[in-house]
Image: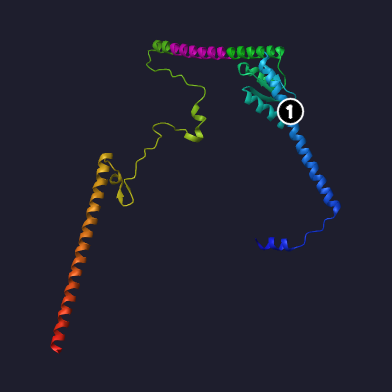
């Protein structure tokens, strides 16, 4: 326990009279009752939704609508619908008129229905007919635009071909070998001049060359032209050479250790003989 906690625990608690205790107890009981009431209400609503969806599964209706509800009740509807294998979607503005619609999978909503419900138009036969006419008109308009673009392109190609033929005829009449070039009205290079510049061509491209040397070693010596098999073989050969060198070093170390042992034994034997001789002389 830290110092502040020990100080707070050692301090006396503020006095609480009986009225404050009763008030706190009543507030706690009221909060628990409200919580239990909300829980019971959600359980009743879930049972209501399950019964309605069960009836909907047995009849021939393509969909069922629920009244505008808050987010919690809509989540209950979505949960029950997904558990039963149905499609559930919500439409409208939040906290104003947002409602949920449950569909059968074989009667999934069309794009027109989703658009109409999102626009707040609802969905019935009249609205379906209106959106179908609107889609048909939009399709016709798109087809007209496509045909207009196609005719415009064909007319441009025809005029360009006629201009080329006229220029060739005039050139033949004048006995000149110059070819007439057709120039576009707009140069696409002007749009990207700030990126590619005005002289964007092969002549304007800079020829780049790699630096011959990077540091002290030439770049051509840094390129490994060996194959994968040759590289692996070289790595294995290096490993074998390293192991062989380690073995040779170990053998040399063992030989050194043997020579040192021999010298120590010879020294000890010489010392022993000298000591025995000195003892004999003294006796």
Q: Which residue is pictured at 67% across the width and 63% down the height?
A: 3
Q: Is 165 a magenta residue?
A: yes
Q: Which residue is pictured at 79% across the width and 45% down the height?
A: 28
Instruction: Left or right? Give the position of 220 relative to 279.
Output: right
Secondary structure mostly seen in the magenta stretch: helix
Residue 101 appears at what percent x and percent y? 69, 22
Q: Is 96 a magenta residue?
A: no
* Residue identified by numbered label 1: 45
Q: In which quadrant of the rendered view does residue 276 lie?
A: bottom left
Q: Residue furthest right?
A: 19
Q: Name above or below for residue 240 compared with residue 35.
A: below
Instruction: Left or right? Give the position of 269 relative to 98.
Output: left
Q: Which residue is pictured at 54% across the width and 11% down the height?
A: 151
Which of the pair 8/29 is nearer the observer?
29
Please report the bounds of the magenta region as a residue range. 145-166
Kind of element beneath mark 1: helix
Q: Name above or below for residue 107 compared with residue 31.
A: above
Which of the pair 131/46 is nearer the observer?
46
Can the viewer see residue 244 in this picture? yes
Residue 260 appears at what percent x and percent y? 20, 69
The total number of labels drawn is 1
Q: How is the image coloured?
A: rainbow
Residue 283 appears at what percent x and percent y? 14, 89
Residue 233 appears at what percent x and percent y? 24, 43
Q: Residues within 10 Å of mark 1 (few under 14, many from 20)?
A: some
Q: Which residue is pictured at 51% across the width and 35% down the height?
A: 194
Q: Name above or below for residue 261 compared with residue 41.
A: below
């Amino acid at each position: 326990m830290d110092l502040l906690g020990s100080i707070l625990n050692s301090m006396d608690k503020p006095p609480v009279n009986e009225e404050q205790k009763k008030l706190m107890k009543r507030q706690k009981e009221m909060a628990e009752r409200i919580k239990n009431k909300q829980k019971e209400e959600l359980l009743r609503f879930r049972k209501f939704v399950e019964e309605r969806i069960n009836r909907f599964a047995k009849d021939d209706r393509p969909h069922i609508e629920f009244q505008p509800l808050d987010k919690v009740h809509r989540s209950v509807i979505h949960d029950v619908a997904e558990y039963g294998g149905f499609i559930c979607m919500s439409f409208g503005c939040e906290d104003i008129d947002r409602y949920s619609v449950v569909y059968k999978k074989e009667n999934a909503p069309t794009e027109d229905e989703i658009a109409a419900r999102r626009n707040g138009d609802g969905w019935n036969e009249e609205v379906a007919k209106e959106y179908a006419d609107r889609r048909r008109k939009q399709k016709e308009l798109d087809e007209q635009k496509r045909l207009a673009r196609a005719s415009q392109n064909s007319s441009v190609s025809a005029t360009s071909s006629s201009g080329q033929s006229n220029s060739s005829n005039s050139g033949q009449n004048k006995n000149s070998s110059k070819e007439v070039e057709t120039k576009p009205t707009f140069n696409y290079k002007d749009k990207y001049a700030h990126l590619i510049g005005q002289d964007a061509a092969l002549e304007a491209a800079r020829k780049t060359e790699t630096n011959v040397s990077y540091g002290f070693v030439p770049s051509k010596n840094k390129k490994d032209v060996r194959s994968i098999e040759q590289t692996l073989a070289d790595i294995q050969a290096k490993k074998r050479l390293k192991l062989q060198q380690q073995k040779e070093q170990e053998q040399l170390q063992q030989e050194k250790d043997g020579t040192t042992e021999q010298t120590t034994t010879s020294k000890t034997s010489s010392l022993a003989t000298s000591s025995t001789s000195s003892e004999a002389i003294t006796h």
